Image (cartoon, helix red, strand yellow):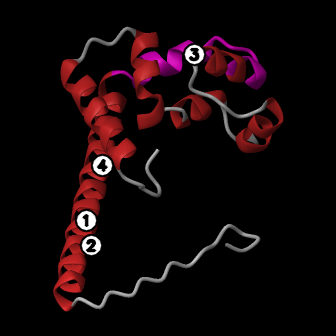
Amino acid sequence: MDDWNRHREYKIMNCSECARQERIEAEKKREKQIENEMRLRELAADIRASFEKNYMDEWITIFQSLRSKKDAWQLACRIGVENKSLSSFYEFSRGKSINEYASILVSIRNMEKIMATLRIQDNILRSKVKEARELMESTFVVGIH
């Protein structure tokens, strides 16, 4: 391991049958991960579309009465959908309105807390969120929030 936590792993396998079996297992694992990533992207799009169609206005209404971005950040922290420090939040939200910020908070990671806050009882949406969370925990996916 070097200073940047990189490491190399070497494996010498003298048994050709064992090496072939390991390649097959690695390929199956890679195919399963690709399948999970595709399913997760599909679920993320479905969840976002469903939420925007049915609940986004209600979510944004919660933030509309706030007078400042700091108030919006404090509310998001209380709900549990924001984990940035105030200074990081200010850097992130520069040039964005409170409504845009509220919209950005809508993600798979935050959906369960948002649904609890809005008291959403949509079983189809809840099952999709649950499946997406399980997929996120089982695979390493880049770009899905």
Viewed as shown, does residue 65 lie left or right of 2?
left
Could you tell me which residue is drawn at 54 percent across and 37 percent down? 104
| Residue 118 is at least partly visible in this image | yes
Find out whether the residues at labels 1 and 2 contact each other: C-beta distance under 8 Å: yes
Q: Are marks 4 and 1 in contact (CB under 8 Å)?
A: no
Q: Is tag 4's residue or tag 2's residue first in the polypeptide sequence? A: 2
Precedes in sequence: disc 3 or disc 2: 2
Residue highlighted by disc 2: 26
Q: Which residue is mark 3?
A: 79
**Residue in the picture at 58% in, 21% down:** 80
Residue pointed to by mark 4: 40
Task: Choose the circle earlier in sequence order: 3 or 4.
Answer: 4
Single out the mark in the foreground, 3 or 2: 2
**Gap in Å between the C-alphas at discs 1 and 2?**
5 Å
Residue 76 higher or lower than 93, as above or below: above
Q: Secondary structure at mark 1?
A: helix
Which span is picked out in magenta?
55-72
- Give how far across and how far down residue 125 sits, in percent: 25, 26
